[in-house]
Amino acid sequence: MSHLAFDAKLHTIAAALAGASSSIDRPEDLARWDRRCGRCCRFRLWPAQTRSGRRRSHRGDTPRLWRAGLWVRANAKRPAVAQTVGVPKLIRDGIALAYEEAGRGAPALVFVHGLACHRGFWAEQVKHFSRHYRVLAVDLRGHGDSDAPEQRYTMQLLADDVAWMCSQLGIERPVVVGHSLGGLVGLELAAGHGQQVRAVTLVDSILLVPCVRAGFVRELVAALRSADASRALREYYSTFFGPHDDPARMAWILDEIIRTPAHVTSSILEDSVQSWDDADALARCEVPLLYLDASTPNADLARATKLQPQLAVGRTIGSGHFSPCEVPEQINAMLERFLAVGLEQKIDDHSAERRRCR
């Protein structure tokens, strides 16, 4: 039996002990179970023998079973994880919230997608940053593989979901990176759960735009609640691309965004202009902030820097709104630099400000 086949057998046994129903017949599947073992705390594996050749003791108040050369001990503290093959989900008040996790290293990075998108839009960032950091990419409530109940979708609810998921997965003070809507969720997360967030990066998020946008959004919400919801959403997103964006990628994005239920997109857009105060959330943030602009009219950055003088601003070149997909190398490079020099500088600034206030 090959090493891969033997390891697959061991992981299959461990999966069965954890209550899962899945088979492992490909290297990708094995890697997926490795991530669950190491990151989701579903079970732990110990070598069957010590270096002296003796088997480990049966002592302990947690059940241990001898299987295929490993001691397998079930972890007593488990998050509520749904057993969905290939897509781990956490269950919050009966609602399944999907996610993808990879890598190790601090600080942890939490990637939050935009409106009508999903965690797959961060594929290039997950691949890049998981080499050196623990990475979590979530599907917001109502998006991707997460449940989409008929309810009101508010910025606070989405931020609370992300904070809860981090808590369940043992992620402490992550750097939250959000594209578009995801950046606003990160901003609300930092404003409402400041002690749980290390820093926030907003990627071309709609921020502090003129009041005239409210009228446009109300018209869009009405269209999304009509029989032509898919067409309305396609037309809206068709304006988000730049002249240099890849046509095949544009087509993929437009096909993906209409998969999100219209009651979700309409509710989030409605809340963004009726209930949520982005200026207040920005002013209340006390963590390092980075805004990555795509040269779109999506943000009033002059006003933003007045509300948050420490706000760092970067700009991508040759991309429309979906810069994490279109120019991932630029996004990754600026994020790398922010992680290297931006975090401590902002923390020092706040420490000095608190000292002056005393």
Image: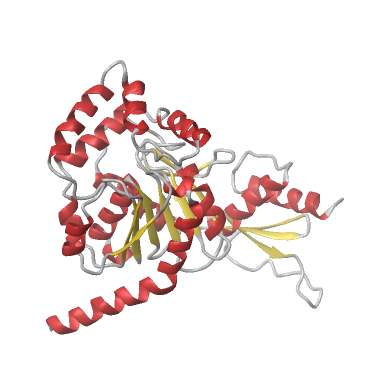
Question: In the shown orientation, is residue 79 left or right of residue 299?
Answer: right
Q: In the rendered view, would you say 50 is above or below 218?
A: below
The foreground one among 313 and 154 is: 313
The foreground one among 8 and 198 is: 198
Question: In the shown orientation, is residue 203 left or right of residue 30?
Answer: left
The foreground one among 242 and 225 is: 242
Toward the top, the furthest residue is 227
**Image quadrant for the C terminus?**
bottom left
User: Residue 231: percent from the left, percent from the top?
Assistant: 35, 21
Q: In the rendered view, would you say 103 is above or below 352?
A: above
Q: In the rendered view, would you say 30 is above or below 21?
A: below
Give the residue drawn at x 67%, y 46%: 28
User: Residue 312: percent from the left, percent from the top?
Assistant: 30, 65
* Residue 77 visible in rendering: no
User: Residue 159: percent from the left, percent from the top?
Assistant: 30, 50
User: Residue 343: percent from the left, percent from the top?
Assistant: 36, 72
- Quadrant for residue 274, please give it: top left
The foreground one among 62 and 267 is: 267
Give the residue drawn at x 21%, y 63%: 305
What is the number of callouts on the image? 0
